[in-house]
Structures are given as C-alpha cells and as structure tokens.
Amino acid sequence: MTLPDPRAARAFRFVGRDYVDGEVRLTYAFDDGPDLVERIGFPGAPQPAPDRRAAFERALDLLLLVAGVSYYKAGIPRQLAIEGTLPATPTAALLEDLYRHGLGEFAWHNRLDLRDRIAFPAVAGDGAAAPALHLPRRTLVPIGGGKDSLVSVELLKRAGEPATAAWIGTSPLIEACAARTGLPTLNITRQVSPLLFEYNRAGAWNGHVPVTAINSAILVVAAILYGYDAIAFSNERSASSATLEYEGQAVNHQWSKSWDFERGFGEEVAQRIAADLHYYSLLRPLSELAVAERFARESRYDAVFSSCNRNFRLLGPKPADRWCGQCPKCHFVFLALAPFMPKPRLLGIFGGNLLDQPELAPGFDALLEYRDHKPFECVGEGRESRAALAFLARRAEWREDALVERFTTEIRPQLAAGELALEPLLVPSGEHRIPAALTALAECG
Ligand SMILES: CC(=O)N[C@H]1[C@@H](OP(=O)(O)OP(=O)(O)OC[C@H]2O[C@@H](n3ccc(=O)[nH]c3=O)[C@H](O)[C@@H]2O)O[C@H](CO)[C@@H](O)[C@@H]1O[C@H](C)C(=O)N[C@@H](C)C(=O)N[C@@H](CCC(=O)O)C(=O)O
Ligand SMILES: Nc1ncnc2c1ncn2[C@@H]1O[C@H](COP(=O)(O)OP(=O)(O)OP(=O)(O)O)[C@@H](O)[C@H]1O
C-alpha cells in the first residue's frame, strides 16, 4: 500500500483514546489516512476507583492532546481536528505553547515557521474547577537513568517521603538504576506507532519533540490510576535557558523541562484534573553544576547510571558502553562532575579522560559557547561550562590535560575573569513549586 504524504494533509485528527485491560490507546490520523496508534501499558491493569473516574477521563484527554505532538510534526497541517471532548480555553492555550515552543528545535532545523500555524479548537470558559480526589500521600519520581532524578530520589529518601521510582519505556539501564534506588518501582511501557517510523522513512517532517511533556501526561494518568498525590520531576533551573535565539525567538531543546512548562502544566493538572495532585520539579532552583555537586556526594549509582541519551533510542544502534564519550551529554556531564569528584573516580565512571582528548575540542567549545551555539541537548548553560573549566584549570591534577590547557591558553584570555567563578552558580535561586516541607532540603541539600 502506498502511504499518503502527511506533509500534503489538510488536517491532523485527534481521533480518540481508550483504556482497556491496563492499556491506553491513543489514535491519530492525517485526513482520512490510516490510524496512527500509540499504546501505553500500565502494569497490573488497574481500574480507576469510581470516585476518580471523571478525573481519569480528563487525564486521558490531556494525554491524547499532548502525545499527539509526535505525530502532528510529521505533517504540520494547518487544521487540528479534535473528535472527542474539546479542551477548555486555558488548556488550548497551554497546548499551543507546548506545540510551538516544544517543536521550536524541530522548526529551526527544518526551517519552518510554526508561529501562526498552531491553533487548538476549544470550548469557551474555564470549565468547573477540578475536585480533590483524596489521593494517598506518596510521590511518583520519574527516573531517566541519569544523575538528576537520582539526586531527587536521595532527597525524597532523606525526607522520609514515600516514593516510587517510575519510568516509561523498556530501557534495561533505567531498570538497573530503579532497582538500585531501593524504592518500589513502576515501569510503564510505551509503544510509539510503527506507522510513524514508516512515515519518517518515506520523508515526513521529523525532529525533536518535547518528550518530558509526554512523560508528564503519562504520569498524571498513572497517579490517578494507582493513587499518588505528587509527581516529582528533576528538571533544573538551567533547563529554562534557550539553546539559541533565532529571528527574535528563543529555541530551547529542553522546553518541556523549563519553568514555563512546569508552571503551566502544574496549574492545568491542579485546576482541571485533580486539585490534590501536585506536579513539580524538585531540582528547579538548582543549576546543572549544583545538581552535579549533589550527585558527586555519594557513589551509590556510579556503576549503573548514564546520562548519555544514545542509550535511550527506540530504533537504531545503542552505544557499546554506558557512556559513548562522543556526544554533548557525555562531554557536559564529565565536565560538570569533574570539579566535585576525585579524578580516578570520574575516569572510572567514563572509562577514560574526555578532557585529555584533543579531537573532542569542538564538542567542548560548543558547551562553552565558544565559536558555536550550545548543543541541542540537555546540557548546562555556557557560563556553567566556562566556570567548571576555569576551576579545573587551577587544579594540579587537571591543568595539564589537553583541553584544560587549551582553555587556559586560548579561551580564558578572551573571557572576563569575574564571570568565571563557580560558587555563585551553586546558589539555589528562582521560582519553583516544591512543597513547603521539602523546600529547605531541596535548596540547602
Ligand atoms: C533517544 C533520543 O535522544 N532520541 C532523539 C533522536 O531520535 P532518533 O531519531 O535518533 O531515534 P529514536 O529515539 O529511536 O526515535 C525514532 C523516531 O521516533 C520518533 N519519536 C520518538 C519518541 C517520541 O517520543 N516521539 C517521536 O516522535 C521520532 O520521529 C524519532 O525520529 O532524535 C530525535 C529528533 O531530534 C529526538 O526527538 C529524539 O528524542 C527522543 C524523543 C527522546 O526521548 N529524547 C530525550 C532523550 C531528550 O531529548 N530529552 C530532552 C528533554 C527535552 C524536553 O523538552 O522534554 C533532554 O534530556 O534534554
Ligand atoms: N524514560 C523516562 N521515564 C520517566 N521519566 C523520565 C524518562 N526519561 C527522562 N525522564 C525524566 O525527565 C526529566 C528530564 O530527564 P533528564 O535526562 O534531564 O534527567 P536524568 O536522566 O535524571 O539526568 P541526566 O540529566 O543526567 O540525564 C527527569 O526528571 C527524568 O527523570
């Protein structure tokens, strides 16, 4: 059968969603083309309690609309057709923000302008405020296999908060981290429609999607199904900074990890799904360096964690080792941990010294925003990388390594000395939604 070209479609249809035997099915289509069906599996096949049924239905509606971003991007038609319940006006505004900003990197790479293209049909008015569901006091803590969520896990353990380590997908690496936390675990499966991959192979539009928003909407469904009153992500302050500016617009690879998304999504959940379900990020006041400093305080996860996103591909090859050593994430995490860890421990984790490999200079330059923009990856701000390298340049055990020496001789003379201090970047700051009982622990460690 010849596949229709989604780029020629007039409409993207949110066809519907259902929940049967522990599986959510989300269905989409371009015009009258074949259904794209995403499947999300909730182990134990729970049924929502009768008094949570209405909230569950609203959470499914939100998930359908949020997860549609993966499929919409294949064609980006002007018309969005919702065949189930239309969202309230504020929800439509949240979705427009998500699709525009969350697809910002996608649009930049494909030289597309999405600004006037995305409008969600909506019902007027705010709708009724969501009631409280009397959810049990316990937290779902999503884990991604990297350092950030493991810092959150340890904070929640120290605070004595009942928590479950939850992850989406079938990564053995995340599973090993989850087991290492010692917390109860919850593994939610997710199967992206195979038809999307066929569209991709046939030349559909493709690029980055705001995956944290998708994971967030899945976890809202899980919180109502299993009974949790909090979802604690591990998105740091630095995630709100743009990757680059283009025609006056900020393009942020990590947009759905940003404070703007967290605030909007958290309010949406509390106002329209369940008044007592709290969505927040426990690391929001921290920079990437501050998170790295906390992670370095204990070695419990050294042998299992990895921040290298090449491990988490759905298709295609994965690296032979937990750290590929070649990608921006490997470079940044090595650099961010170096000021806070004994060198032999860090080299043991990565299986080598990335700062003593001259061929990696272009990768580190991009992190410093030297002759390049920050990479499209989950990495800290340029000033964090510059401060970390300036710190290492003063340390006897690091200063003779090729890329540290190059920084000292070639790059540092071009930088203002006053902007290279590490300590100010470790100070918590900025807005957050952390519950009062946890704020002091999150901010002071
Ligand atoms: C693992 C990864 O980084 N993948 C990115 C990569 O995808 P690639 O084409 O190399 O392969 P697959 O991951 O196997 O995906 C195959 C195609 O499937 C589609 N797709 C996948 C997942 C999904 O949720 N929706 C989808 O539509 C897509 O068409 C894929 O081509 O490059 C893609 C294009 O730039 C990225 O979109 C893939 O990123 C994944 C969605 C992903 O999970 N990435 C996270 C590791 C990630 O980037 N996290 C960000 C958070 C950003 C945010 O705002 O949430 C971060 O840590 O900064
Ligand atoms: N597969 C997943 N399932 C559930 N949550 C995830 C998944 N992947 C990432 N996350 C969550 O999304 C947020 C952003 O992910 P991110 O990759 O920045 O964090 P991380 O893996 O904990 O740390 P690192 O930055 O070192 O990779 C974190 O809260 C993380 O737990």
Image (tube, rainbow, N blue to C red):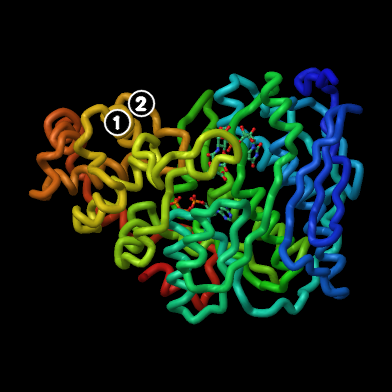
Residue hosting label 1: 365
Query: With respect to residue 101, does 63 lie above or below?
Result: below
Rounded to the nearest angstrom, the CA distance separating label 1 from label 2 is 7 Å
Foreground of the two, 16 or 79: 16
Dividing the picture into quadrants, the one containing residue 373 is top left
From the Cβ of disc 2, is ligand 1 less than 8 Å away? no
Taking the spot 25% from the left edge, 27% from the top edge, the residue there is: 359
Point 78% across, 58% down: residue: 59
Quadrant that contains the N terminus: top right
The residue type indicated by label 1 comes to Asp
Q: Which residue is mark 2?
A: 372
Residue 294 visible in the current orientation? yes
Q: x%, y% of residue 121?
A: 85, 40
- Whole-percent x, y for residue 270 in the image: 71, 65
Q: Residues within 10 Å of mark 1 (few under 14, many from 20)?
A: many
The mark nearer the N terminus, 1 or 2, is 1
